[in-house]
Amino acid sequence: MPDAAAATAAPDARLAYPPGKPPPSWAVATAETIMARWPEYNRAYHASWTYVHGYALCAFERLYRDTDDRRYYDFIKSFIDRHIAEDGSFRVVPDGRGRRRETTFTNLDNMMPGNALVMLYELTRDERYRKAAERIRRALDDYPRNQDGGFWHARALTGQMWIDGIFMGQMFLTRYGKSIGDGAYAWDEATRQLLVYAKRGERDDTGLYLHGVYESGHGERACRWADPKTGRSSEVWSEGLGWYALMLVETLEVLPKEHPNRAAVEDVFRRLAEGLRRAQAANGCWFQVVDKGDQPDNWTDTSGSAMFVYALQKGIELGLLAESSYAPVVARGYAGITSFARINERGLVDIYQACDGVGVQVDYRHYIDYKKSINAKEAVVGFLWATEIVERARLRRDAAR
């Protein structure tokens, strides 16, 4: 039976986990599965350098810090070193289809893996990583914005601000500001992007946010998904809201206590957390369209659900949320997402109940009917983020023995 992953997965990938039984650590088993399926991680997806690579490498870094297992560090470094030459320039590297295309920073998605560049600079002080990160940083200098300062999702997507793009751009920028420079700009920009979206994209007064907002007047063709009066998309998409939840807590972890926007960002996060607490489904997960769980054709999504588990647990750890109120939500969420995970006949982790690569859709029906995929790339990595943070204390105890 072929592996239930992308066609680019190594055909002989196998692990020793017993099929059908939960592993000792879902986080470790998922990371090992990624490494087994894609020993050359640049060949995993539609391009050799994508937001999903960066998303995964963040979790690999956390596992490395939890366990001191060198495999995780080596996996990160191997991916980055394939792309970065000795002078800090970007090499042209084959992707999953064998294509070789230049890495550009004309969209926010491609900025995300820059987080791993900064991480390696922190640990090695190798100047090539700093120089490569500087190239990404400079791409923001003239990056296009709406009148309120919100970044377009891509230079070609005129006037379009997507909720996922806030994570993609600011995940890199906040770490760059913390470890390399431009800290004042990084904090101001990251909080501006979060708060601009909070103002433009909230669904009524729920603390939940729509997938996209659009500003006309840039000489472009009409945006099909945008309401012609409000410029807003129609629905609160689980995974998109998850990207936003992640960026809120990741920003609040490093944002100086005295920053003038800190209180406002904390308020946005707490209101979002309360909205998620109210919207959690009976199985512990959250619906594909988060605020329409009463619709009989709606279904629970592992990708966004995993993101919410991570964000809520991180909120507890940062002292932003009451443990008594939210620890049960996290526990139910962890149980929910792991109920949609399986060890297959090859001993590899498979993740079910998610979609792959969803852009902004025109209406509820298009979100609900979007094709589900086994091992949707964002869901696999979201699952890794969530299981690592929930299992972290045990992983660290085991590593210390």
Image (cartoon, rainbow, N blue to C red):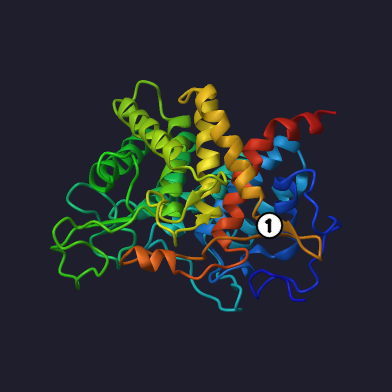
Camera-nearest residue between 240 and 353: 353
Residue count near mark 1 (Cα–Cα under 10 Å), binned few <14, some 14–19, many ≥20: some
The image quadrant that residue 3 belongs to is bottom right
Q: Position of residue 270 (x, y in %)?
A: 39, 30
Image coordinates of residue 7 in percent, x first then y, are: 65, 75
Residue position marked by numbered label 1 in the rendering: 78
Q: Position of residue 127 (x, y in %)?
A: 56, 46
Q: Residue at x 36, y 55 (%)?
A: 139
Residue located at (69% from left, 65% from top): 40
- Quadrant containing the N terminus is bottom right
Say what amino acid the circle numbered 1 marks: Ser
* Horizontal side, residue 143 vs residue 358: left or right: left
Asked if 349 appears above or below 3 in the picture, the reply is above
Q: Is residue 131 visible?
A: no
The quadrant in which residue 367 appears is bottom left
Position of residue 165 in the picture relative to residue 64 (left or right): left
For numbered disc 1, what is the local secondary structure?
A: helix
- x and y percentages locating residue 278 in the rendered image: 42, 37
Residue drawn at x 31%, y 40% is 206
